[in-house]
Image: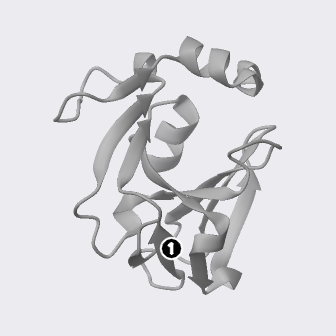
Amino acid sequence: MSSDIRAGGCLCGAVRFAARLSGTNFGACHCEMCRRWTGSALLGITVPEGNVNWVGADSIATRQTSAWAMRAWCRDCGSGVYFRVTAEGPYADAYEIPIGLFDDPNGLNMTNEIWIDHKPDSFSYAGEDRNVMTRADCVAKFPVLASE
């Protein structure tokens, strides 16, 4: 396991965190909900629940945004703080933290893009050799997504 501990927080500083990363790979989600939540794509890194220490957690608001997941933001400035799967399964014990919240987001690797067939044609990311999944690929792997 990596000993890479990264600090970060929201725009106003009411929410801060220290996250012990278990790797440097992150992904982009192009689904409509993530695009509307972030204004672009969610560029997020998965951090196990036990690897995050929150300061100012009373400033975090949450909303169940689907039958299987929630999103959280700072009550004071509105910055998106995390995405989290709430349904039972292998992803339920982790936060998907937007990499833009880290004080130092350098050295991270974009290795996955999901809902690639929903990515607007007006932008693309540099780099190659990413795993990509269409909406149909995502639903096939995670049937709970069929309701989205």
Category of crowding for the residue at label 1, using alpha-carbon neighbours closer than 10 angstroms: few (below 14), some (14–19), many (at least 20):
some
What residue appears at the point 37 percent right and 49 percent down from the top-left corner?
A: 25
Answer left or right for 7 relative to 129. Answer: right
Residue 127 in the image: state x and y as whole percent. 17, 34
Q: Secondary structure at mark 1?
A: loop
What residue appears at the point 39 percent right and 48 percent down from the top-left corner?
A: 26
The residue lying furthest to the left in this view is: 126
Query: Measured along the vertical axis of the image, is residue 110 above or below residue 124?
Result: below
Answer left or right for 68 relative to 15. Answer: right
Residue 41 in the image: state x and y as whole percent. 41, 40
Query: Measured along the vertical axis of the image, is residue 119 above or below residue 37?
Result: above
The residue lying furthest to the front in this view is: 1
What residue appears at the point 45 percent right and 31 percent down from the top-left corner?
A: 30
Question: Count of labels shown?
Answer: 1
Residue 1 in the image: state x and y as whole percent. 47, 65
In this view of the protein, which residue sits in the foreground, 57 or 130?
A: 130
Query: Measured along the vertical axis of the image, is residue 2 above or below residue 97?
Result: below
What residue appears at the point 46 percent right and 74 percent down from the top-left corner?
A: 10
What residue sits right under mark 1 in the picture?
77
The quarter of the displayed image where residue 33 is located: top right
Quadrant of the drawing holding the C terminus: top right
Query: Measured along the vertical axis of the image, is residue 44 above or below residue 129?
Result: below
The quarter of the displayed image where residue 73 is located: bottom right
Residue 102 in the image: state x and y as whole percent. 37, 70
Coloring scheme used: one colour
Type of amino acid at the residue the image marks with label 1? Cys
